Image (cartoon, rainbow, N blue to C red):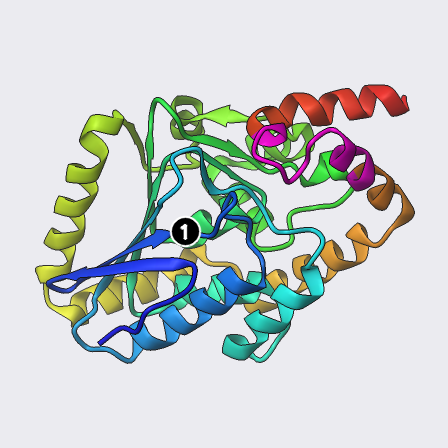
Amino acid sequence: MIQSFATLKVHQAGAVLFVQIAAPPMNLLGPELVRDLVSLIQQAETDATVQVLVFKSADPDYFIPHVDVTRIKEYRQEAAKLTGEASIGLLFRHLSASRLVTIAQVEGRVRGAGSEFVLACDMRFAARESAIFSQPEAGLGALPGAGGIQHLVRLMGRARALEVMLSSMDYDAELAEAYGWINRALSAANLDDFVAALAQRIAKFPAAGRIAIKERVNAIALAPVDDFRRDSDLFGEGVRQPAAQQQIQAAMLRGFQTRDGERDLGRILGELSGEQA
């Protein structure tokens, strides 16, 4: 039996565990959410009745916008409770390597470490009308440190991955689908039924086959732990640099980490660069 959480709402249907992210005011990835994700993964991996996890958001506007940049040390300490290392990148890689099949059902904005979380999931499906994707780290003077570089280059190829990460722009679901960021963009009206049916179909097949397939695919497509560790270290070093701190503070003044300010974060970051030119 999966226990309850402060920032996650869970419901099990057969061998599928549906997980809603509910961390007001906007699902920032902070220590509370990381703590609950660690506990969820630990419980689900040891529960033989759970085969598939489906992640969605209780907030229609925000899936996970990014990390809480004011609490980096705290959320890293929570991540270490699963992997032994203070890195959400290694936490996310653990999820990719897990026996569990994971599906992200994305509505609203998913940027930075939120994007890296859904990239760590085995599959991603998004609402055509509302899903927005971004890796905004370059606009803040840093780099994606939780697996974004490793996943996006493999999914998109070098040129598109560089475009996405260096531009810090927002991408809608249709373009994200065309670039390979997600499996499919679907209408919001059909998204729930499609994902639920796919999850149940996968969950009913023999576990040994699923595990063997994931292991072989990961052997080809999942970057080594050391590559995730290196990106995590570079992110930590980068956000402490004076230029990054200046960008973050300027972004805060424009509404960074607020619901209203983040509705058009790509535009805000572009204007910050212009102000400093």
Q: How many marks?
A: 1
Q: Is residue 122 magenta?
A: no
Quadrant the N terminus occupies:
bottom left
**Percent from the top left, x then y, of residue 142?**
75, 45
Q: Is residue 259 magenta?
A: yes
Amino acid type at image mark 1? Ala
Q: Residues within 10 Å of mark 1 (few under 14, many from 20)?
A: many
Span of residues in magenta: 248-262
Q: Is residue 231 visible?
A: yes
Q: Quadrant of residue 224?
A: bottom right
Q: What residue lies at 18% left-to-right and 52% top-to-bottom?
A: 199
Q: What residue lies at 72% left-to-right and 62% top-to-bottom?
A: 233
Give above or below for 42 relative to 12: below
Q: What residue lies at 43% left-to-right and 59% top-to-bottom?
A: 7
- Between 4 and 243, the one lying in front of the other is 4
**Percent from the top left, x then y, of residue 38?**
45, 70
Q: Quadrant of residue 13?
A: bottom left
